[in-house]
Image (tube, rainbow, N blue to C red):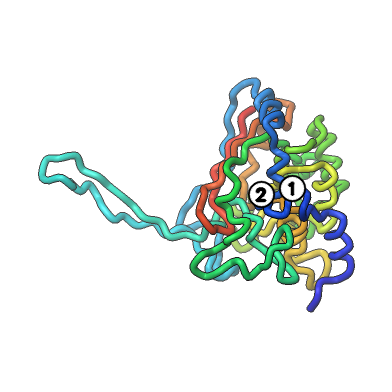
């Protein structure tokens, strides 16, 4: 089944191929300039730090619905082993097997393709079983630090969390931006809160994944117009699931990652941040969200921290 004309019309409007050169592999992260980081640092007033990552644990958010995306399996390979003989210093070591997108993570630009293409028009076939992503892998961004802006959609709409059938629209983003009291600007990292992660934190993993609120197919144009560097939210699938347009699956992924070259993140815990921003009366902060540089990876775990 081919993608509908509506998708291709939006894709044409948000396409960034060639904007930063034909060899570019980091897309909208190019918008995080030295000046953008300097301005982000000016957001730090109290030094209050808010962690945004879920714990990496075997009983994590994955339920098996996404093939191969396993929760972390953690095993010990040494326990108090005296490596250099009796009475010497003892060491403990461990190993983890996990899906790189199992919990709080960034999607690399190579994470999805459509019509046989990745970001910047590169062939999807450049991803191989043994080498992973030869182009647009998660190892290519060297750092992701910028001004973060929380767009708290439930708070802007006067609810605790969005209903599972709620597609976050550009109008919702406008309302949350007005609540935040700051305009999203070039190089910002936008965090979109839906409140959906409350379902997971309450112990219902199945309801967390489906049905789920998320970003509408109309939102990529909003982010493109603002020159946003990256977007993350507090859901399993990032976009509304099931999709708002019948049989148009992962359209927002394709528009963000393939067409725009904009990294996106999922399973970010934005609950404590929502409380902190409400208490502080401000929704902009310094955000450090450094990707683990797995060579050839199409995603990576991340432990982001917002500093107010």
Quadrant of the snapshot with the N terminus: bottom right
248 or 224, which lies in front?
224
71 or 4, which lies in front?
4
Q: Can you see residue 12?
A: yes
Question: How far separated are the C-alphas under marks 2 and 1?
Answer: 9 Å
Residue 157 in the image: state x and y as whole percent. Answer: 82, 43
- Could you tell me which residue is drawn at 62 percent across and 36 percent down? 145
Secondary structure under tag 1 reads loop
* Mark number displayed over residue 29: none
Q: Which residue is mark 2?
A: 26
Snapshot quadrant of residue 247? bottom right
Snapshot quadrant of residue 158? top right
Query: Hey, which residue is sitting farthest front in the picture?
Result: 22
Mark 2 vs 1, N-terminal side? 1
Q: Which residue is mark 1?
A: 20
Secondary structure under tag 2 reads loop
Disc 2 and disc 1 in contact, CB within 8 angstroms: yes
In this image, 173 relative to 254: left or right? right
Q: Can you see residue 193?
A: no
160 or 59, which lies in front?
59
In this rendering, the answer to whether 49 lies above or below 252 is above
Residue 119 in the image: state x and y as whole percent. Answer: 71, 59
115 or 189, which lies in front?
115
Residue 137 in the image: state x and y as whole percent. Answer: 59, 56
């Amino acid at each position: 089944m081919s993608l509908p004309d509506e998708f291709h019309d939006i894709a044409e409007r948000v396409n960034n191929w060639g904007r930063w050169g034909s060899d570019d592999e980091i897309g909208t992260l190019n918008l995080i300039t030295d000046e953008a980081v300097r301005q982000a640092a000016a957001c730090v007033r109290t030094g209050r730090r808010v962690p945004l990552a879920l714990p990496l644990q075997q009983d994590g958010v994955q339920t098996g619905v996404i093939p191969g995306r396993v929760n972390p399996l953690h095993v010990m390979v040494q326990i108090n082993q005296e490596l250099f003989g009796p009475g010497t210093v003892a060491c403990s070591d461990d190993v983890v097997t996990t899906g790189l997108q199992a919990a709080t993570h960034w999607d690399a630009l190579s994470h999805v393709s459509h019509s046989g293409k990745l970001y910047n028009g590169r062939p999807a076939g450049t991803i191989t079983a043994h080498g992973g992503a030869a182009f647009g892998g998660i190892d290519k961004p060297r750092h992701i630090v910028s001004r973060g802006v929380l767009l708290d959609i439930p708070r802007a709409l006067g609810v605790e969390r969005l209903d599972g059938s709620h597609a976050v629209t550009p109008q919702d983003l406008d309302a949350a931006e007005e609540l935040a009291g700051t305009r999203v600007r070039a190089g910002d990292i936008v965090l979109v809160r839906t409140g959906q992660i409350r379902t997971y934190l309450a112990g219902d993993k199945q309801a967390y994944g489906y049905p789920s609120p998320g970003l509408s197919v109309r939102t990529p144009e909003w982010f493109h117009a603002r020159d946003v560097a990256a977007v993350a939210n507090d859901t399993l699938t990032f976009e509304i699931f099931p999709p708002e347009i019948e049989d148009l699956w992962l359209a927002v992924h394709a528009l963000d990652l393939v067409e725009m070259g904009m990294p996106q993140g999922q399973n970010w815990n934005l609950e404590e941040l929502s409380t902190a921003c409400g208490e502080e009366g401000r929704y902009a902060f310094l955000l450090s969200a450094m990707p683990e540089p797995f060579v050839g990876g199409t995603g990576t775990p991340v432990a982001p921290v917002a500093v107010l």
